[in-house]
Image: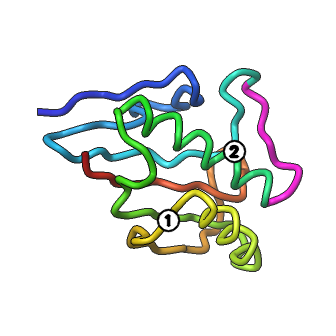
Amino acid sequence: MKTAVFSSNAPEPIGPFSQAVTTGNLVFVSAQFARDPFTNAFKMENIGTETKQVMENLSAILKAAGIDFSHVVKSSIFLKDMNDYVTVNNVYSSYFIAPYPARETIQVGGLPMNVNIEISMIAVK
């Protein structure tokens, strides 16, 4: 059995998927990109700003599920340019304390809406 999670403080999905889905004590958060949930504008001035908006969107969804970043056990980061890794890592790491979640960072050929970064997460309640 699964239940959709929705936060009005995060962008609505652009396709047939939920912001997150819970099943049992697991929370699967769909990859988010840097779209402001209130203006629908993309925050892409630079990779730091873009990453911060992604993390804020993820935070809102986690909160709607009744949890926060301390519950995240796995993150997947998709980057258009691996040269952005250090900046992304600096912003990303500011949202966590040890023990940190498992993670992979993958360079991809392209992302929806021509964004530079997407991050998805798995958390445990």
Mark drawn on residue 53 = 2
Tell me which amino acid carries mark 1: Ile
Q: Nearer the viewer, mark 1 or mark 2?
A: 1
The residue drawn where x is 39% and y is 71% is: 99
Q: Left or right: where does residue 103 sit relative to residue 95? A: left
The residue drawn where x is 37% and y is 37% is: 20
Q: Is residue 43 magenta?
A: yes
Mark drawn on residue 54 = none
Quarter holding the N terminus? top left
Relative depth, front residue between 114 and 91 = 91
The answer for how far apart the CA atoms under marks 1 and 2 are is 19 Å
Percent position of residue 118, x then y: 59, 55
- In the image, residue 57 sits, relative to residue 95, either above or below, namely above
The residue drawn where x is 35% and y is 28% is: 5
Tell me which amino acid carries mark 2: Gln
Q: Is residue 100 magenta?
A: no
- In the image, residue 1 sits, relative to residue 94, either above or below, namely above
Q: Residues within 10 Å of mark 1 (few under 14, many from 20)?
A: few
- Residue topped by disc 1: 97
Instruction: Name which of mark 1 and mark 2 comes first in the sequence.
Output: 2
Element at label 2: helix
Q: Left or right: where does residue 62 sit relative to residue 125? A: right
Q: Main secondary structure of the magenta part?
A: loop
Magenta stretch bounds: 40-47
